[in-house]
Amino acid sequence: MMQRDFSHFLDIFYSLGSLSVSLGYLKAKGECVRNEESGAIAETDALKVKKLTFWEATMIIVGANIGSGILALAYASRLSGWPILLLWLVIAGVFTTVSMLYVSETTLRTKKNLQLSGLAQKYVGSTGSWIIFLAVVANSLGCMIAYMAGSGKILNAIFGISSQLGSLLFAIPCILVVWLGLKATGVSAKIIGWGMLLLVSLIIVASFLSGKADFGSAMYAHWAYAVPVFNVALFCYIAQYVVPELSRGLRHDARKLAPAVITGMSITFVFLALVPLAVLVLTGPEKVTEVATIAWGNALGRWALLLANLFALCAMITSYWAVAGAMLTNIVDKFNLKSEWDIRTRIIVVACVVVPPFILAYSGVVSFVNAIYMAGTFGGVAMSILPVMMLRSARKHGDVEPEYTNGWIAHPVVQTLLIAVFGAGAIYAIISMLGFLPKGW
């Protein structure tokens, strides 16, 4: 067993190492775009502007948020109860939306199209840039590991094929849209996203009207397991990494950026609350599985199993598009690569994005829910707190006066509360990892 696990680690190390060498080559090639006298990055077209509509931008946020996390919420909250989950969804949703609006104003104060890591480099320095870049990578990898593992389980349950084959089949449309870029992601997310929401709405209504619903199976509160649920709830909302993408796509109509963020997050909250409620009232906490739609569908019948798992696949694929696309452009931005549409660059960077999650998903190193928990804890904290510092600096050193500015939500009291809430979640996670507190799984 130990030898096999060590072999897995060697395979992972070798694969990641090979990709790092390729990135190093591209970075060296990209250094030619630097201004030799000042050391500043020259204005280049590394990230192309692709116009998005309001609903394309909104559904990218919905697609990014309603992914693997929504499938794990019922399982993660089975010990604490749904009322505690609802409380955390409200708190995490409000503060994450505020953080996203901080990023929105920061991007609109910046003339050049930059991703989170580039914005951090400009406004808080190299250390902040590396922290937020690693946070984006950690969050993206956590998401995509969960999508690879979860999709394999679902296709195995429906068709009886191996989980590995299921994950490979799932990866094909994922990689295709990521390759095609931002506009393809927006159009695809809008089409698949509305279909996904229609599917899950039908199943939620059927759940509540089935005659099997027992609301007592969800309406309990065990506070000893409350805080770990916050970290999963936080993960479900973490979408700061897509805001620079939306800003890039809405440059032609920047006033729509903040409304798109708020609308997308509001739609997200409704379904993050209703899906685990419907699952828990049908199955009870004892029968919830890690990928909740499997147990959910079994409780309603074969038709619901198919629809619920089709929803799950749609949720995973729309989220994959958003997080993988953001990770891709953050790599291009962070390593100052020539252009996201340079063929050699795109092949290597797409490989860096899509290969490691598949390897890690079947390495036995991380589980579905643990991937979500860790990504939500550390990636989420960094992407929620650093925008506070970025906004403060952008208001002093930004390039232009923006079309949108945050009002009272940028008050120092709100900023302090945001840092305190997410910081406390990280502290709890560290203590829990050391074995001093129950993880709640």
Image (cartoon, rainbow, N blue to C red):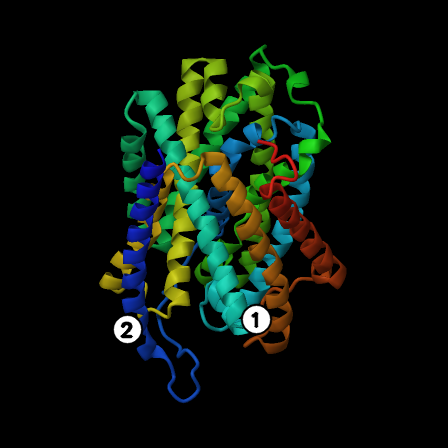
Observer able to see residue 384: yes
Q: Residue furthest right?
A: 413
Residue at the image point whose x is 66% and y is 29% from the top: 80
Q: Secondary structure at mark 1?
A: loop
Looking at the image, residue 351 lies above or below residue 370? below
Give the CA separation, mark 2 to mark 1. 26 Å
Residue 196 sits in which quadrant?
A: top left
View extreme (front): residue: 2
Question: Crowding at label 2, few (<14), some or many (≥20) Cα neighbours within 10 Å?
Answer: some
Q: Residue 176 or 4: which is nearer the viewer?
A: 4
| Residue closest to the far bottom | 37
Residue 383: % across, % down? 56, 56
- From what the image shows, is residue 383 above or below residue 85? below
- Looking at this rendering, what residue extends furthest in the left direction? 344
The image position of residue 34, as x and y in percent, is: 37, 80
* Residue located at (45% from left, 35% from top): 368
Amino acid type shown at disc 2: Lys
Q: In the rendering, which numbered label is found on residue 124? A: 1
| Residue at horizontal 45 percent and vertical 58 percent from the top | 245
Picture quadrant where residue 231 is located: top right
Residue 30 at x, y percent in the picture: 31, 73
For mark 2, give the secondary structure.
helix
Q: Which mark is residue 29?
A: 2
Q: Which label was assigned to residue 322?
A: none
Which quarter of the image is occupied by the N terminus?
A: top left
**Among the two numbered marks 2 and 1 on one chain, the one whose residue lies closer to the N terminus:** 2
